[in-house]
Image (cartoon, rainbow, N blue to C red):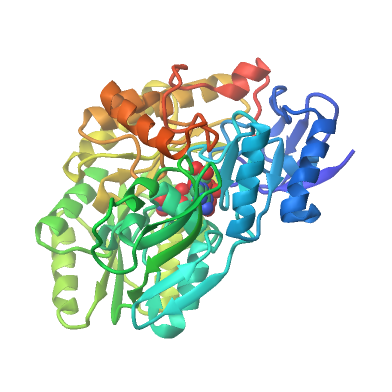
Amino acid sequence: MRRLTILGPFFVPAPLSVRFAREPHRVTSRASGIYHVTPSSGPRVPRPRREALARGLASIVGAEHAQWREPELLVYDADGLVLEKFWPDLVALPGSAAEVREVLRFAAREGLAVMARGAGTGLCGGSLAERGGIVLNLARMNRVLAIEPDDRLAVVEPGVVNLDLSRAAARHGLYYAPDPSSQMSSTVGGNLSTNAGGPHCLKYGQTHRHVLSCELVTADGDVVRLGDAAPGGPAFELLSLVIGSEGTLGVVTELTVRLTRVPETVRTFLVSFDTVETASRAVSDIIAAGIVPSALEMLDHLTIVAVEPYVHVGLPLDAGAALLIELDGPAAGMDRRARQIAELCERNGGRDYREAKDDAERALLWKARKGAFGAMGRIANGFYVMDGVVPRSRLPETLRRVGEICHERGLRVANVFHAGDGNLHPNVLFDPDDPDQVARALEASHEILRACVELGGALSGEHGIGNEKREMMGLVFTPADLDTMRAVKRAFDPGERLNPDKIFPTGAAPWRPAPLRAAGSEAAWI
Ligand SMILES: Cc1cc2nc3c(=O)[nH]c(=O)nc-3n(C[C@H](O)[C@H](O)[C@H](O)COP(=O)(O)OP(=O)(O)OC[C@H]3O[C@@H](n4cnc5c(N)ncnc54)[C@H](O)[C@@H]3O)c2cc1C
């Protein structure tokens, strides 16, 4: 028997202890008792064949970077979604584009699917090995190859962690602007592939605004360069196809990205409101006044209740909502904009107005926002992070609807989100030990996304489609739209080996509570 320790980002704040037994695998959590991992889990390819295939991979990436044993594979059975689990048959950790190319050629010869994977923080099951095959972990390709301050760009490998790039650029007074809340661990390759957003993308735009070109290895092992660091260009603009394509078109092995000058001044404010509606009105008024804050984030009452005892930032526990507002740019005019924001908040009932006096206090205010997902573990054993988007003006209505959907199913919901972008993240809380609650949470999440679409929004503001939302694509795209996208996929990947079964509907039911379905009454959660 072997023991491992896993930190589950969402379901279980406490370390898990996983025991490998014959069947089923038992997973014990201090917080939530004993669950059973899906009996269907485990690699599909029998052990002797895996071992043989691993020898082939080892001849490309080296024996220590070709993994095939169960404990090695288990690490890759889920991403941040953790609702669905599929074991890969093999994992390869290439060290260069040439090795990626050879792994893809090897996979083509052996008829294996390949799933690129950055840090695995994705929240839509994007890097899962639903059909088995090879997970291509790009973590070793983590070098910042060049920083060119005069041209304000950087050339990086895909496995560079987002925040590490900004740290590397800091000595030149530059940083990488797209800042998903996972920036301490998610990779620039994963960010490109999901077109990641983040709190500061309200002003600076999502990842696609910051990628100038990339090197891509296609399913057949061809290496192509898309986009150009120089402006303009007469050719097809294929880079845009790849950004946000979630690893379905090729494996990104190098990126040239735009760097942004560190702003002269940053001002950060935290304001409480009695209700989400009044806070939302303040958001609309700020934008209508022509002010574009660099960030405009909202926490609702339940999120405040989860976060405050953890960060001690002084948020009143009776507040219905709080806004975290940040301004950045030249010092000139900053005071005037800060005053305007204070007035607009006050006019909408804003109270407990607080401004960070220094960087330490700014970091504390941000901890209230960026630590919110982690803090959910204080109020529930399990939660499901949704990612819908609606026009900003429909936020109050949407949040009301989200509340109703959850209330009707006897569930609590905590909202923390990029209010300025209309990108909501309802966190549907549930007890993973209760299969009925799990089923209700899944149903609620489906209804929430349907409501976002009905209110003029879309299925994803930033997390992507993956396998989580693919069966709902028909809500927003016509069959002709989807056929056009499929034609693009086939042009890059005729054999459909790269991240198969992602993004496109397969005809299955919209939500497949796989752990319940597979394990009967004994749900499986990590
Ligand atoms: C606490 C937390 C906060 C988050 N906050 C945000 C947020 O604010 N904004 C946001 O947008 N997302 C957020 N996310 C989701 C997630 O971090 C992003 O989707 C991120 O971009 C994923 O990066 P990754 O390196 O973990 O990629 P992975 O999860 O490993 O992969 C994501 C997708 O990209 C593909 N992929 C990865 N690398 C490559 C490559 N080199 N070539 C081709 N395809 C590749 C994978 O196949 C998969 O489809 C958050 C997640 C967590 C856990």
Within the image, what quadrant is residue 176 found in?
bottom left
Question: In the visual, does 64 lie left or right of 6?
Answer: right
Residue 474, by quadrant, is: top left
Residue at the right extreme of this rendering: 1
Look at 26% across and 30% down and name the residue there.
Answer: 453
Q: How many marks?
A: 0
Image x and y of residue 402, in percent: 32, 32
Q: Residue at x 65, y 60 (%)?
A: 95
Q: Is residue 89 above or below residue 251?
A: above
For this rendering, which residue is in front, 289 or 246?
Answer: 246
At a point 23% along the width and 58% down the height, the residue shown is: 234
Between 192 and 421, the residue placed more toward the observer is 192
x and y, in percent, of residue 250 in the image: 49, 45
- Which percent across, then down, holds residue 427? 44, 39
Tell me if 230 is positioned left or right of 486 in this view. Answer: left
Quadrant containing the C terminus in the rendered view: top right
- Vertical placement of residue 69 versus 312, above or below: above
In the rendered image, the quadrant that contains the N terminus is top right
Q: Is residue 376 left or right of residue 336?
A: right
Residue 323 shows in the view: no
Instruction: Name the residue at the left extreme.
Output: 289
Q: Position of residue 320 (x, y in %)?
A: 31, 47
Q: Nearer the viewer, residue 444 or 292?
A: 292
The answer to whether residue 81 is visible is: yes
